[in-house]
Image (cartoon, coloured by chain):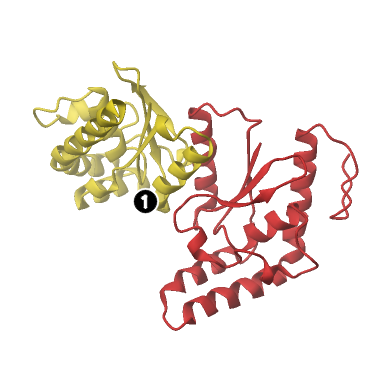
Chain colours: A red, B yellow
C-alpha cells in the first residue's frame, strides 16, 4: 500500500508526521530530519518518498498549497478514475493551525543570501514546535488506521498508543 | 486513456474543451449560445464539486474524457497528477490538460457573475461571448492533445 500524507507543503509538518509515523524521530529533533524544509524536493510535484513502514507500505508526503481539501479531493477522485484499488492507496490530510503560515513562508524561498531559506525554517520550526503534539497525535491516528487496514491488532508501543 | 481537462471552476473552459474532444461541438464554426448551454455541466457547477473529477463522455476510440474544477491550485495540479500517476504505475494512461491559459477576461467576468454572484441572466451572455472568443484556441489546444496522444500511441 502507498500512504500519502498531504498538507500545504510536503517538507514541513507532513514530513514530520511521516517520520513520526515511521518512528524515525528522536524526541522533538525534527529539524535534523532528512529533507526537512528542503523545498527542492517537492518542486517537481512528485510525492516525496519518506520510507517504508513495518508492513512494507511506502510512505510519501505531498504539498498541495493552500487548498489542501480540494487537492486531496482531486487526488482521491483521480485515484478512483484510474482504477486504483482503495486498499492500495491511503490518503491522509495533515492539518495543523499555522499551516498556511508555513506555506506562505515557503514562498519566500526565492530571496537571496539564504534569507528566504532562513524565514522558511524559522516559521516552520516555530509552528511545528508549537503544534508538535497535534502532529504526533495525527501520526498516532495514522498508526491505528494502518494497523486496522492491515488487520493487525498488536500493541503499537512506539508512539504510546494502543490499537483496539 | 483518461483525459482530464481542468480549469478554475470546472464548468466553462474545461467543459468546452472536453466537449470539443468528444465531438459535442462543431470545430469548423463558433458554437451558438444554445449549443454551449446544452453541454453537460456548462455553467452549472455548484461550489461543492471543486476537486471532484467529473465524467464528460467517451470518445469513439474508447478514451474517457473528464473535467475538473480546481480553484486556485494552479498548474501544480498537472505535476501532482502526473507524479501520482507515475507512482501508481498509470502514467501512460493519463493526460492532464490545464485550460486556464485560454480563459479570457470576459469568461472570468461572466463566470464570476453567473456562478459566484448568481447573476445568471447578466453573466451568461458575457460568458458565452468570451467562450466564443476563446473557442478557436480551445480547439487548437484539443487538437494538440489529440496529436500528442496519437504520437504517444505510435511510439
Q: Quadrant of the C terminus of chain B?
A: top left
Q: How many marks?
A: 1
Q: Badge 1 sits on which subunit?
A: B
- Say which of A64 and A69 sits in front: A64
> Does A57 sit above or below residue A158?
above
Q: Quadrant of residue A164?
A: top right
Task: Determine whether, in the image, residue A37 is placed left or right of residue B127.
Answer: right
Q: Which residue: 40% across, 38% down?
A: B68
Secondary element under disc 1, as helix, strand or loop, is: loop
Task: Determine whether, in the image, residue B80 is placed left or right of residue B114.
Answer: right
Judge whether residue A21 can be spotted in this image.
yes
Q: Residue furthest left?
A: B29
Q: Badge 1 local density, few (<14 within 10 Å), some, or many (20+)?
A: some
Task: Determine whether, in the image, residue B34 is placed left or right of residue A26.
Answer: left
Residue at image mark 1? B75
Q: Residue furthest front?
A: B155
Image spot of residue A107 (x, y percent)? 46, 69
Q: Which residue: 27% across, 23% down?
A: B22
> Does A111 sit above or below residue B134?
below
Q: Quadrant of residue A56?
A: top right
Q: Which residue: 78% across, 56% down?
A: A23
Image spot of residue B145 (x, y percent)? 26, 35
Q: Quadrant of residue B67?
A: top left
Image spot of residue B132 (x, y percent)? 15, 38
> Does A124 sit above or below residue B97?
below
Judge whether residue B12 can be spotted in this image.
no
- Say which of A89 and B12 sits in front: A89
Q: Quadrant of the N terminus of chain B?
A: top left
Amino acid at each position: 500500500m502507498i500512504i500519502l500524507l498531504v498538507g500545504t507543503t510536503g517538507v514541513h509538518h507532513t514530513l514530520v508526521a511521516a517520520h513520526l509515523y515511521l518512528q524515525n524521530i528522536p524526541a522533538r529533533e525534527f529539524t535534523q530530519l532528512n529533507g526537512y524544509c528542503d523545498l527542492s524536493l517537492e518542486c517537481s510535484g512528485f510525492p516525496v518518498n519518506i520510507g517504508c513502514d513495518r508492513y512494507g507500505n511506502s510512505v510519501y508526503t505531498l504539498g498541495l498549497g493552500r487548498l489542501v481539501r480540494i487537492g486531496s479531493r482531486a487526488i482521491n477522485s483521480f485515484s478512483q478514475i484510474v482504477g486504483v484499488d482503495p486498499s492500495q492507496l491511503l490518503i491522509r490530510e495533515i492539518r495543523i493551525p499555522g499551516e498556511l503560515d508555513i506555506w506562505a513562508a515557503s514562498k519566500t524561498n526565492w530571496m537571496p543570501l539564504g534569507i528566504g531559506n532562513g524565514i522558511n525554517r524559522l516559521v516552520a520550526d516555530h509552528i511545528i514546535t508549537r503544534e508538535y503534539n497535534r502532529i504526533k497525535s495525527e501520526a498516532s491516528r495514522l498508526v491505528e488506521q494502518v494497523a486496522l487496514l492491515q488487520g493487525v491488532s498488536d500493541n503499537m508501543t512506539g508512539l504510546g498508543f494502543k490499537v483496539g | 486513456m483518461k483525459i482530464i481537462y481542468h480549469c478554475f471552476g470546472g464548468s466553462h473552459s474545461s467543459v468546452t474543451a472536453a466537449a470539443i474532444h468528444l465531438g459535442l461541438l462543431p470545430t469548423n464554426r463558433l458554437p451558438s449560445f444554445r449549443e454551449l448551454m446544452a453541454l453537460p455541466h456548462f455553467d452549472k457547477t455548484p461550489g461543492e464539486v471543486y476537486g471532484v473529477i467529473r465524467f464528460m463522455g467517451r470518445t469513439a476510440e474508447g478514451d474517457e474524457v473528464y473535467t475538473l474544477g480546481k480553484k486556485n491550485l494552479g498548474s501544480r495540479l498537472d505535476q501532482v497528477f502526473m507524479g501520482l500517476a507515475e507512482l501508481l504505475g498509470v502514467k501512460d494512461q493519463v493526460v492532464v490538460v490545464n485550460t486556464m491559459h485560454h480563459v479570457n477576461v470576459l469568461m472570468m467576468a461572466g463566470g464570476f457573475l453567473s456562478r459566484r454572484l448568481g447573476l445568471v441572466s447578466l453573466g451568461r451572455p458575457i460568458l458565452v461571448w468570451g467562450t466564443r472568443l476563446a473557442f478557436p484556441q480551445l480547439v487548437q489546444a484539443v487538437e494538440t492533445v489529440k496529436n500528442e496522444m496519437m504520437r504517444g500511441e505510435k511510439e
